[in-house]
Amino acid sequence: MKVLQVLPALHSGGVERGTLEFAAELVKRGHQSLVISSGGPKVAQLLDQGSTHIELPVHRKALSSFAQILPMRRLLTELQPDIVHVRSRMPAWITWLAWKGMPAARRPALVSTFHGMYSVNPYSAVMARASRIIAVSECVKQYVLDNYKVADERVTVIQRGVDINAFCPRPPETQWLARFHEEHPRLAGKRLIMMPGRISRWKGQTLFVNAMAQILRQMPDAHGIIVGGAEPGKEHFLEELEQQCRDLGLSNDITFLGQRNDINELYLVASVVCHMSTKPEPFGRTITEALASGTPVAAFDRGGAAETLRACFPQGLVTPDDTSAFAERVMALLVTEPPPVELPWRFQLQAQTEATLAVYDQALSER
């Protein structure tokens, strides 16, 4: 099977990581994997894994992007993929309009993934035009059914799967740990409370800093680590967070680690992982990755993140936006031995891959 995935770019983020992981699985199973994006630092990894990357500026949310319809149509005609899988709205518009202009007999099967609960408007509606739709959680599926004229049987829930070979309980790699402590000596011997996620206001880093202020009053051996980079245009928010730490006297108690490529090792040295998004997230990949690594998670009881935690580690759920309760839950997790967590099959990468291939087969049979 020849599968073409289309997304805006290959920078950091859950969609990008999911695309790369799935592309690698396709190659392992003997399928041909192609990806169209505007490029980015993750292209090298994609190529190393055996996929083909085609650079096309499909990322800009502007009318000028529709100039890419004809180049996309030429690519679809030349490449002749069996499946085209769109993962974002602007690339989906370009792809769908290119696809519509092809002779019906030569069109590939079209599949989309709702990675989020997009604003309800004509721009977002393109994601519902695919013959088969994947939703990353039950709450996302319900959102699709509530807001678009889509038959229930066209929407399949497939949770983002964790590679349990990459994320599993084990001692941190010795050389990595020595290098980590050499780079960040004040973290040695501390109980690390980790907040992963790109630097963005709705991800909840402001609440995390406030919770750390409360935790440190009772547990001075704790230390907060914020893992994630500031995307272009978000640098001012990172500066706000750093100023918030200074104002609260926490500059020596919270470390900003930036964008990392060693997240699997960081989960292993963390004592607790926090998820504090201020609006419902569609899924919450960091929750399953941390739990697969054997690290307990505290998260607000909302959206797909809560759906995931309820299935895997309900002890970590906290009333939404209650920072004091969140701090108390983190401290409780620090002083109690967490029960062993075994991720249900549906949250594992192999399950995601097999379920997605089954959706592809359905789309091909309907074509």
Image: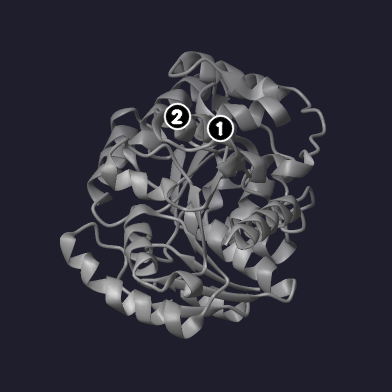
- Provide the residue designation for mark 2: 280
From the top left corner, tell me how far across and down residue 108 is, in percent: 51, 69
| Residue 205 against residue 18 in the figure, above or below | above
Q: Which mark is residue 61?
A: none
Residues at discs 2 and 1 in contact (Cβ within 8 Å)? yes
Within 10 angstroms of label 2, few (less than 14), some, or many (20 or more) residues?
many
Query: Residue sitting at 61 percent across and 51 percent down?
Result: 266
Q: Secondary structure at mark 2?
A: loop
From the top left corner, tell me how far across and down residue 359 is, in percent: 64, 54
Along the line of sight, which residue is nearer the eye, 193 or 126? 126
| Residue 217 against residue 77 in the figure, above or below | above
Quarter of the figure that contains the N terminus: bottom right
From the top left corner, tell me how far across and down residue 50 is, in percent: 62, 80
Task: Give me the C-alpha separation between circle 2 and circle 1.
Answer: 8 Å
Which quadrant would residue 58 be assigned to in this image?
Answer: bottom left
Q: Secondary structure at mark 1?
A: helix
Along the line of sight, which residue is nearer the eye, 148 or 190? 148
| Residue 260 in sight | no
Q: Amino acid at mark 2?
A: Pro
Quarter of the figure that contains the C terminus: bottom right
Q: Which mark is residue 305?
A: 1
| Residue 57 in sight | yes
Query: Residue sitting at 47 percent across and 27 percent down?
Result: 212
Q: Residue furthest left?
A: 63
Which label's residue is closer to the chain start, 2 or 1?
A: 2
Q: Amino acid at mark 1?
A: Ala
From the top left corner, tell me how far across and down residue 164 is, in percent: 75, 53
